[in-house]
Image: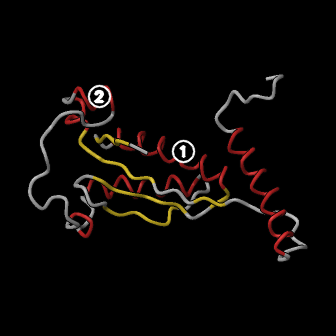
Amino acid sequence: THFGKCIDEKTPLLRSMDAVKLYGLRLLKALGIGTDAQTMHSYLGWEQEFFVISADHFKARPDLVNCGRTLFGTLPTRHQQGDLNYFQPIPGKVQELLDIAQAEMLKIGCPMAVKHNEVAPGQHEMSPVFRTANVSCDSNVCFMEVMNREAAKLGLQVLFHE
């Protein structure tokens, strides 16, 4: 706007990257190290954690459909909170989804570095190679879109909470 306020979600990130660069260079010069530095870059590596469930189970739960998360249910069964799920093989359909998502992300220039189970049953994670902060944020949004699109083709639903 003409008052200098941003009306999008990207401008604050770009402004903060400029501020980190400006004050980072100032700090280096004040400390007497890197006095010849011309620029400074902000890098970011996101870890996207998500749950993958059957689309039919998703549609049968009004809390998931309306809120994208569980609002009612029961406490976890005994020992479910341990790390046993973390070390289990990724279920077949989920592995297929993650492989497709990894290939799709590589096509758009975002190589994924990590994919594995998380502690909770049905919870998984994928992470890319570190990139500049603004590109990394864009890649995360693209990843969520790719996951939702490809999961629907496989009869699955992805629940993001971060």
Q: Quadrant of residue 66?
A: top left
**Residue 76 coordinates in the image, percent (x, y):** 14, 50
- For label 2, the residue is 65
Q: Quadrant of residue 15?
A: top right
**Residue 19 coordinates in the image, percent (x, y):** 77, 51
Q: Quadrant of residue 131?
A: bottom right
Quarter of the figure with the C terminus: top left
Residue beneath the point at 9% across and 58% down: 78
Give, as a three-letter code, the residue at label 1: Cys
- For label 1, the residue is 142
Q: Secondary structure at mark 2?
A: helix
Q: Secondary structure at mark 1?
A: helix
Residue beneath the point at 65% across and 54% down: 133
Q: Is residue 103 left or right of residue 29?
A: left
Quarter of the figure with the N terminus: top right
For this orientation, the residue located farthest to the top is 2
Is label 2 or label 1 in front? 2
**Residue 141 coordinates in the image, percent (x, y):** 54, 43
Give, as a three-letter code, the residue at label 2: Val
Q: Is residue 35 left or right of residue 92?
A: right
For this orientation, the residue located farthest to the right is 36
For this orientation, the residue located farthest to the front is 30
Q: Is residue 9 left or right of residue 54?
A: right
**Residue 117 coordinates in the image, percent (x, y):** 31, 61
Residue beneath the point at 25% across and 29% down: 63
Q: How many marks?
A: 2
Residue beneath the point at 15% across and 37% down: 73
Q: Residues within 10 Å of mark 1 (few under 14, many from 20)?
A: some
